[in-house]
Image (cartoon, helix red, strand yellow):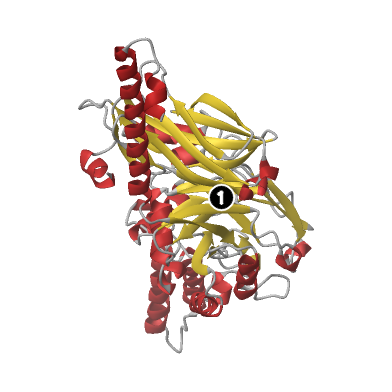
Amino acid sequence: MISANLCVRPTARYCILWEARFLQYLVMCGIACGISFQAQGESKQVSAAIHIDALGISDENLSISETVQLAVQARLSVAVITPHDNARVSYGLPPLRNVIRFGVERESITSFGSENYLEAVRTTNLNEPEVLTLAGVEAVPAYFWQGSPLKRLTARNLHKHMLVVGLTNSEDFDSVPSLANGFPGRLEGAFLLNLWPIGVLVLGCVLVLFNRRVSTADAPRSKLPGILVMVIGLLFGFNAYPFYQPFDAYNGDQGIGPYQAVIDHANARGALTYWAHPEVHQYSSMPAPWPASILVDSVYFETEPYSGDLLTAEGYTGFAIFEEGAISIGRPGGIWDQTLLEYCSGIREHPVWAIGELDFDMGHIDHGIGTSQTVLWLNEVTESGVVDALRRGSCYARRGMGTDITINDFMISGDQTGFTSGQNGQISGTPMVTIDIDTAPASMPLTVQIVRNGASIHTIEVEEPGQLTFRDTGPGLKGAFFYRFMIFKGGWPIVASNPIFVTIDPDPVSVIGNPKQIEASL
């Protein structure tokens, strides 16, 4: 019927031309469908709540089991539990800062015990099989003190955190680098200088032995000076132990080093690292505990946004774009796009992925466990499957009103090939962007923003669910590019995809990354 209608034209040549174009269209649709099916395989979408600060040591907060029961009610499939690795803040008085110090401590994996924590997660998986529960950690690598007990004493960067997902045993949890757990030391000049208390202790021992040897009944020699020297050596030796730590809390901002140590620790164990709430500005205070209250009434805590660290750090997996990462990091041309451009140009070894984090720790009064989600494309709902999907960027983030939105497909295709979220490959011809949106009518209308290499290239107003297509005919489209998109509701970002990397009409110098890596991703 279609062919006959098309043939009602002035000439046979006109009829043949339209039939050929129509057949070409059908072939391209078939290729696109085949590409999408091949890329996604038999995968399905599951919703994950990442960053749940649950332990339940005190009555104020929910236990892991209680939190996962809320996840069941919210129809989530995965819950990533991330209590703090340690939650002790201490201030030491000079010159014996590690001997004379005061501090406060909240519940953490350290206080609960890593074996107890892992056992609680295992038990929850047995009792609540509807939700896969993963044991993660919210690392608190460092902070530094500003001021003094005689003035305004402020702990800075205490709220600068990293999420670690994929650690498998208690030793790995116990050794996450931090001021509390210590950092890997190196044999260098500072290490040797910190050994001076050992010399004082040896001197004290020599004085005691010497005085004992020369002491007589007529001319007794006191051992007290030698004993005092030994005590001084012991005190300062204990204060300096373990004799070399590259970072401390008393010499200002320690830079990216403590956080890079966490990233390296996770990478060495096949785990993933994410910057948590990187745009947050946290400020609070609390009364000083006794006996510190003798010197100071209150202790203050302040953390400035640390989005710039995403450009400085290397080897991490990604960052939380929701709730606190979409304004300066996630905007077109922002810090996220800058890291992705570094990957395209070969400066950065791995791309940076975005997730949605929950930061759920409000106890029994907060049941909004589904308000920020990471949606994963999985072949199997297992711990290894979840970690692998996160590692590959096979996911997207959604929050608030966006939790009713499902992205059935996101693909960049050329004349014959196409790729989906997190993939990296080569295409020829004019790129076609395909986004398939499924949502409840109440979520409409929406605005979809398509971003290419950090620039917003197209905006689509969406009034009803369906498949959106956009052919990118921009000038000079040859070389390495990435595409991603964001969805807005009333001006607020509510869905963020992860990027797709393509090399368009590739030549030997424009391919993204290593050719073997690209071949493996096809």
Q: Looking at the picture, how far across and down is residue 268, in whole percent?
A: 34, 59
- Relative to residue 498, is residue 55 drawn left or right? right
* Quadrant, the C terminus: top left
Residue lying furthest bottom in this view? 217
Q: Nearer the viewer, residue 16 or 177?
A: 16
Q: Tell me the residue at 36%/48% (across/down).
A: 37
Residue under circle 1?
356
Q: Is residue 140 above or below residue 507?
A: below
Q: Tell me the residue at 38%/50% (across/down).
A: 40
- Relative to residue 460, is residue 432 drawn left or right? left
Q: Looking at the picture, how far across and down is residue 111, in whole percent?
A: 58, 74
Q: Looking at the picture, how far across and down is residue 417, in whole percent?
A: 30, 36
Label 1 CA crowd tier, 10 Å (few <14, some 14–19, many 20+): many
Q: Look at label 1 and name its amino acid.
A: Gly
Q: Is residue 8 above or below residue 299?
A: above
Secondary structure of residue under mark 1: strand
